[in-house]
Amino acid sequence: MLLNAIVKHVPVFGKFAEESVPILEKLEEVTDSVVVPLLFGVHRFIDEYSVDSIYEVFSELRCVRSLSIVLASGGGNVDEAYLLACYLQKTVDGKLTIYVPRYAKSAATLLACCGDEIVMLPIAELGPIDPVLYDERSGKYVPLQSILELIDMLASREMPRDLVREILDKLPVIEFGDYKRAVDHNIELATKILEKRMFKGNPERAKAVARHLVSYKQHGAAITVEDAKEVGLKVRLANEKESKLLWKLHNLWKTYIVLNEYDVKTDEWTPVEFKLGKGIVLTITSLQSFEAALKEQK
């Protein structure tokens, strides 16, 4: 839920906003573009709720000539990422640049592909776009291939039924369907996004790059700037001015948002979003702080 009043009730959120906005404003001067941060905490993913809040923030933008997205995300639902990517591509007539200070993995890589180019720091990484499943028990996305491999292993070995049942009970409750169809689906989504901007007029190249991004052997594989170039993406390293500003922003995000998430008790938190400059931060907070901010905002 987009709850801007939360910055008054969680001191670290207020400090993050206070110290980050000047950096974003300087980045606008350096890039000569409208800069919009999309910063996901480690416990937040691209899903229908986050897309709703992002849309609410973006709907306030007017007459965007050139747009730069600063993206930090571990991934999420690939279909929601596709919807968001399509929307972002339509919000700007000019150049759309995706900046990745540290990481944009899995579904966030699909989102990054919506730009005309991707700009990364030397230690930034993208990730494979292979199929994943949301596990409600852990609140995380799990690679589908890993689950299928585990089930195949259990089926091929003689193991006590109780042990097998115990293992299966810990797996996400899903309909597995056809893994190949899931892979083809992700390739199709990535191809559609890539051929709208990055490889406009070259659908064959868009599909070839999409296949590479989906076909990695390991879901957690790090795709560096050099790897991304080999895959065929239009990507470059951030220049000196961009790098300094992006790294400052990353350190603030890590200090005030990421570390704060680990301090919030697991059974007492709720998702929350608040505006940051022209963009948004998606993180978590305690129920107590959330309820106080909600009361004030109403």
Image (cartoon, helix red, strand yellow):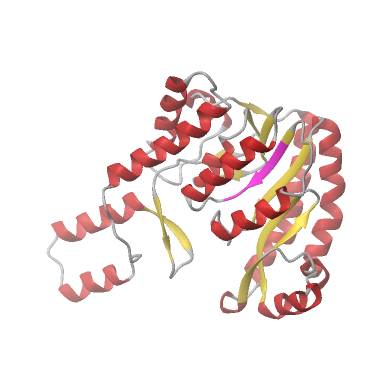
- What x and y, as percent, mark residue 194? 52, 30
Left or right: 19, with 230 as reference point: right
Compared to residue 293, the image places residue 205 above or below, namely above
Left or right: 150, with 191 as reference point: left
Where residue 183 sits, quadrant-wise, is top left
Left or right: 48, with 98 as reference point: left
The quadrant in which the N terminus is found is bottom right
Compared to residue 103, the image places residue 11 above or below, namely below
Q: Residue furthest left?
A: 158
**Magenta run includes residue 70:** yes
Which residue is drawn at the image coordinates 51% and 53% (left, top)?
A: 76
Compared to residue 215, the image places residue 107 above or below, namely below
The answer to whether any part of residue 185 appears in the image is: yes
Q: Main secondary structure of the magenta part?
A: strand
- What x and y, as percent, mark residue 123? 62, 38
Which residue is drawn at the image coordinates 45% and 40% (left, top)?
A: 128
Q: Residue furthest top?
A: 201
- What x and y, as percent, mark residue 118? 62, 31
Magenta residues (range): 68-73
Which residue is drawn at the image coordinates 23% and 72% (left, top)?
A: 165
